[in-house]
Amino acid sequence: MNTDYFKLLQEIDSIVTSGATLGEILQNTCKLLKTKVYHYDWVGFYILEERTLNLVLGPFYGKPTEHTIIPIGKGVCGQVAKNKKLKTVQNVCLESNYIACSIDVQSEIVVPILKDGKFVAEIDIDSHSVAPFTVEDENFLTSVCQKLSGLF
Ligand code: SME
């Protein structure tokens, strides 16, 4: 399945500059990514709550998850918040620090959103395929997070 990542980045630019609220922008981004990229089966944002230092589920597109609050360091999401580095898990069965959401999920990529070098939020994508993510996904999602970072 060919994905035109360049075109998608242009669509992200339109969403970011649309004048919508932060919540709407994040929601529209989730919907765009989930519907336009074949191997993205669940797309959501976790946002750092400064007061508790927990990750709180923000807008998402896909099935509801019971993991609405994740402590820093826990699961793939918590590791990315702690290390401020993108993490790709090509096979979730091989990841010991993983929080399972659904038995359908085989792989996951989490990309941090940094503002002035500080972690503020992250984009979390689950896939029902094993090892679907390439360096192209990593570069693409890093660009998406850079475009969103100015909104926080
Ligand atoms: N699998 C994640 C938890 C969040 S759900 O995928 C929506 C993790 O290990 O942090």
Image: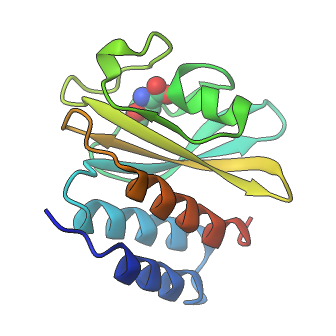
Residue 89, quarter of the rendered image: top left
Q: Is residue 87 above or below residue 142?
A: above
Q: Residue at x 84, y 36 (%)?
A: 51
Q: Is residue 72 above or below residue 147?
A: above
Q: Quadrant of ligand 1?
A: top left
Query: 29 or 21: which is nearer to us?
Result: 29
Query: 98 or 5: which is nearer to us?
Result: 5
| Colour mode of the rendering | rainbow
Residue 146, quarter of the rendered image: bottom right
Instruction: State left or right for residue 98 relative to residue 78.
Output: left
Instruction: State left or right for residue 15 relative to residue 100.
Output: right
Q: Is residue 74 above or below residue 61?
A: above
Q: Is residue 59 above or below residue 67?
A: below
Give the number of callouts. 0
Residue at the extreme top of the image, as rendered = 96
Query: Which quarter of the rendered picture does the C terminus lie within?
Result: bottom right
Residue at the extreme front of the image, as rendered = 135
Q: Where is residue 90 shown, x and y percent of the image? A: 33, 31
Q: Residue at x 55, y 32 (%)?
A: 77
Q: Where is residue 61 shown, x and y percent of the image? A: 34, 55
Query: 90 or 47: which is nearer to us?
Result: 90
Q: Where is residue 72 shown, x and y percent of the image? A: 69, 25
Q: Residue at x 33, y 22 (%)?
A: 92
Query: Which quarter of the rendered picture does the N terminus lie within?
Result: bottom left
